[in-house]
Amino acid sequence: MLSSTTVALLLADARLPSGGHAHSAGMEPAIVGGLRREDIPAFLLGRARTTTLVEAGTAVVARHRFLVNGTTPGLQQVVAAWAARTPSPALRDAARLLGRGYLRLASRTWPDDAAVRLCAELGRPPRAIVLGAIAAATLMEPQDLVRLMIYDEAQSAASAVLKLDPLDPAVPVTWVLDTCAALDDRVDDLSRLTTPEAIPASGAPQAEGWAEAHALLTQRLFRA
C-alpha cells in the first residue's frame, strides 16, 4: 500500500495525465474580467476561503462515504450538496470535465477497487467526488486530502498567470505558499467532516460571474 503522502504527491503533480493543464482554477476568467496583477494574491486567498473549502469538504465527505457506507444514493447526496454550493453552470461543467479525467486515470490505476467502481456509476461525478474515491481507494489520510485540494487549486491558478500575464516564475510560488499557510488552520476541521450538510457553503459571486462570461468566449487559453 502506498503511503498517504505519496498519493498526495502523485495527485498534486501537474504532469499527471488528468486534464488539469486545460484549467486555470478561475484565473483566466478573473483576468479577462479585469483582475489586476496586484490583486492576484487576494484573489487566490478569497478563492481558497470559498470555492476551495467547498471542494475540499466535498472530497472529504465523499471519501468517508466511499469507505463507510458507499451506496449510489449516498454518494448522490454528496454530489447534490456540492452542486448546491456551486451555483455557476460553467463551474459545475468544468468540475465534471476534470472529474472525467481523474476517473479515467483512477479506473486504469485501481480498476478493481470498490470505491472507484462505485464512482464510475455516478454518471459525471465532479473532481472532488472522484478525488474522494481515489482517497478511499488508497486509504489517503483526510488531512492530506484537504491539503491537496488547497494546494492544487492555488497552484493551478497561480501557474496559469505565467501564460496569461507573464512575470518572474518565482513570484507565483510565494503566492501559493502564502495561500496554503493561510488555510492550514482549517485543515483539521475539514478533515473531520462526514455529512453533506457539514460541507462549507461560502460562495464567490464575482468569480462565478466571471466564469459564466468566460464560458461564452470564442478565444481562450483555458477551459475555465
Image (cartoon, rainbow, N blue to C red):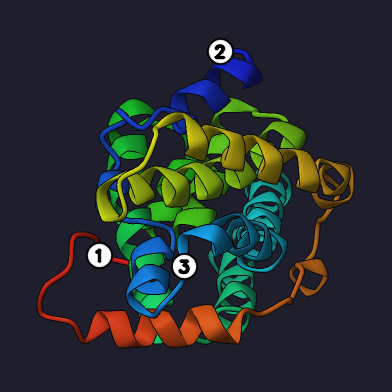
The quadrant in which residue 44 appears is: bottom right
Number of disc labels: 3
Horizontal side of residue 165 vs 177, given as left or right: left
Q: Secondary structure at mark 1?
A: loop
Residue flagged by tag 2: what amino acid is it? Leu
Q: Can residue 9 be seen in the rendering of this structure?
A: yes
Dot 1 amino acid type? Arg
Mark 3 surroundings: few (<14), some (14-19) or many (≥20) residues within 10 A: few
Q: What amino acid is at disc 3? A: Arg
Quarter in which the C terminus is drawn: bottom left
Q: Which mark is residue 81?
A: none
- Circle 2 — which element? loop
Q: Relative to 94, say whether 63 is above or below.
A: above
Residue 36 at x, y percent in the picture: 47, 67
Instruction: Tell whether 163 sits left or right of 174.
Output: left
Q: Which mark is residue 2?
A: 2
Eyeballing the image, is 7 above or below 129? Answer: above
Taking depth in this image into account, of 9 and 210 the one nearest to the observer is 210
Q: CA distance from mark 3 to mark 2?
A: 42 Å
Residue that badge 3 annotates: 36
| Label drawn at residue 223 | 1
Q: Is residue 124 visible?
A: no
Determine the residue positioned at 60% across, 60% down.
55
Residue name at image x 64 percent, y 76 percent: 81
Local crowd size for mark 2, using a 10 Å CA cut-off: few (<14), some (14–19), many (≥20): few
